């Protein structure tokens, strides 16, 4: 029973760390592509698809 609890706590910790890592990478990625949102607005009249904005 205690072993299962320990494994559950470790899994929660690992998932939390993974979530934080993904969030920080995503944040950096979004900062990198921030220019694309301006580009999207500029090129709206061309109907240029920028799906990740």
Image: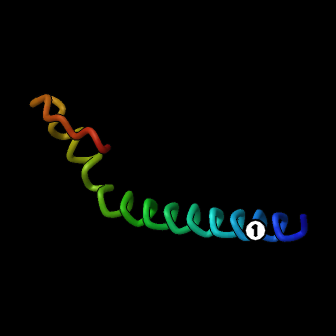
Residue sitting at x 71%, y 63%: 12
Q: Position of residue 1 (x, y in %)?
A: 90, 64
Residue under numbered circle 1: 7
- For disc 1, the neighbor class at 10 Å (few under 14, some 14 to 19, many from 20) is few
Image position of 38 with respect to 26: above or below? above
Q: Position of residue 5 (x, y in %)?
A: 84, 65
Quarter of the picture containing the C terminus is top left
Q: At which x and y percent is residue 50?
A: 22, 40
- Asked where in the image residue 9 lies, by quadrant, the reply is bottom right
Q: Viewer-proximal residue, 25 or 12?
A: 12
Q: Nearer the viewer, residue 45 or 27?
A: 27
State left or right for residue 30 relative to residue 48.
right
* Coloring basis for residues: rainbow
Q: Residue at x 43, y 60 (%)?
A: 26
- Tell me where residue 46 sits by quadrant: top left
Residue with the most extreme right position: 1
Q: Position of residue 32 (x, y in %)?
A: 31, 63
- Farthest residue in the left direction? 46
Q: How many numbered marks does the figure carry?
A: 1
- Provide the secondary structure element on which disc 1 rests: helix
Give the side of residue 44 with respect to residue 1, left or right: left
Q: Nearer the viewer, residue 29 or 12?
A: 12
Q: Quadrant of residue 16?
A: bottom right
Q: Could you say which is closer to the camera, residue 38 or residue 26?
A: 26
46 relative to 24, above or below: above
Residue at 29% in and 57% down: 33
């Amino acid at each position: 029973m205690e072993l299962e609890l320990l494994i559950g706590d470790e899994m929660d910790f690992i998932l939390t760390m993974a979530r934080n890592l993904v969030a920080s990478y995503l944040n950096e990625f979004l900062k990198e592509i921030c220019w694309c949102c301006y580009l999207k607005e500029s090129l709206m009249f061309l109907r240029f698809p920028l799906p990740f904005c």
